[in-house]
């Protein structure tokens, strides 16, 4: 675990019930969901298989073990889960080496949270090696804590990643605002008891109690996130 939580950063903004903001990475802050699918398609093409585009909604947003396992079973490809994971991570790293586009509104939101000293964590199902590469584009200074999918015993859709992040920041999960782009991530955050903002990237997400759905991260700012917190 390479993440640290500076004590000074964990202060809650005076007068606000919002204690922290927890952000997903792929498809939420960086426009990479398409990157993963392209890499998966390329790897399986080399193995002699063509991926059905309808599978994209199945594999998006989940841990690599789930998505890769599904694709192996669906195609019947002669490759182990561990071997496929190596190929997918390598392919993704090559892709982001040619430029990493941020989602509209991402840079502005991160800057605002930093300016107001809101404790912020990056919570991703991607592996640590991928997160560390992406952080060079996002700016590691914006995050008091980062949580990778290979650093928790159970990753999304289980609540563990968000519970781990809240504990690391020393905050109440119910006073955390989570921003996610997939149903898998939303399920994880809701299971942890967080207030959720869904910004769907590939598949639609319906509104629900403790969940607000917006079409773009450009509609999300600190005032918006503070308004999500329950009274009392």
Image (tube, rainbow, N blue to C red):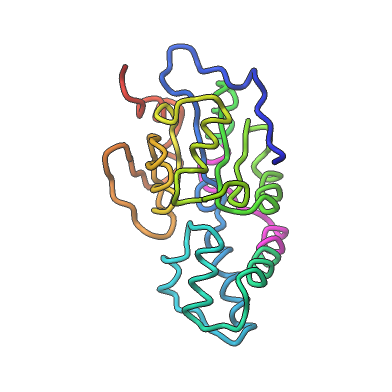
x, y percent for residue 31: 55, 54
Q: Residue at x 42, y 42 (%)?
A: 189
The answer to whether residue 143 of the structure is visible from this angle is no
Q: Which residues are magenta?
A: 92-107
Q: Residue at x 45, y 49 (%)?
A: 158
Q: Give the camera-side residue of 102 and 90.
A: 90
Q: Residue at x 37, y 41 (%)?
A: 190
Quadrant for the C terminus in the image:
top left
Relative side of 103 to 55, left or right:
right
x, y percent for residue 39: 61, 70
The answer to whether residue 127 of the structure is visible from this angle is yes
Residue 169, above or below 45:
above
Q: Give the camera-side residue of 4 and 223.
A: 4
Residue 26, above or below 78:
above
Relative side of 129 to 39, left or right:
right
Q: Is 208 within the magenta?
A: no
Q: Give the camera-side residue of 60 and 162.
A: 162
Q: Is 101 within the magenta?
A: yes
Q: Residue at x 71, y 60 (%)?
A: 98
Quadrant for the N terminus in the image:
top right
How many numbered discs, if any?
0
Residue 100, above or below 139:
below
x, y percent for residue 78: 60, 83
Q: Give the camera-side residue of 123 and 157.
A: 157
Relative side of 133 to 107, left or right:
right
Residue 38, above or below 198:
below
As drawn, the residue found furthest toward the bottom would be: 48
As drawn, the residue found furthest toward the top would be: 14
Splitting the image into 4 quarters, where does residue 92 fall?
bottom right
x, y percent for residue 86: 69, 67
């Amino acid at each position: 675990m390479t993440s640290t939580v500076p004590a000074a950063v964990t202060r809650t903004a005076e007068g606000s019930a919002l204690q922290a903001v927890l952000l997903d990475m792929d498809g939420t802050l960086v426009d990479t969901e398409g990157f993963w699918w392209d890499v998966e398609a390329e790897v399986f093409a080399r193995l002699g298989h063509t991926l059905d585009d309808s599978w994209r909604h199945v594999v998006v947003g989940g841990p690599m073990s789930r998505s890769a396992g599904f694709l192996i079973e669906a195609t019947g490809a002669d490759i182990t889960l561990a071997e496929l994971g190596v190929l997918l991570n390598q392919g993704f790293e090559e892709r982001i080496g040619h430029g990493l586009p941020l989602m509209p509104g991402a840079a502005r939101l991160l800057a605002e949270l930093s300016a107001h000293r809101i404790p912020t964590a990056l919570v991703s199902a991607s592996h640590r090696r991928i997160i560390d590469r992406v952080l060079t584009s996002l700016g590691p200074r914006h995050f008091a804590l980062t949580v990778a999918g290979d650093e928790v015993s159970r990753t999304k859709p289980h609540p563990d990643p968000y519970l781990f992040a809240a504990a690391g920041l020393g905050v109440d999960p119910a006073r955390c605002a989570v921003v996610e782009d997939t149903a898998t991530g939303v399920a994880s955050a809701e299971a942890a008891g967080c207030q959720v903002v869904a910004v769907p990237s590939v598949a639609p997400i319906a509104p629900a109690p403790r969940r607000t759905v917006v079409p773009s991260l450009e509609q999300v700012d600190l005032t918006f996130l503070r308004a999500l917190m329950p009274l009392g």
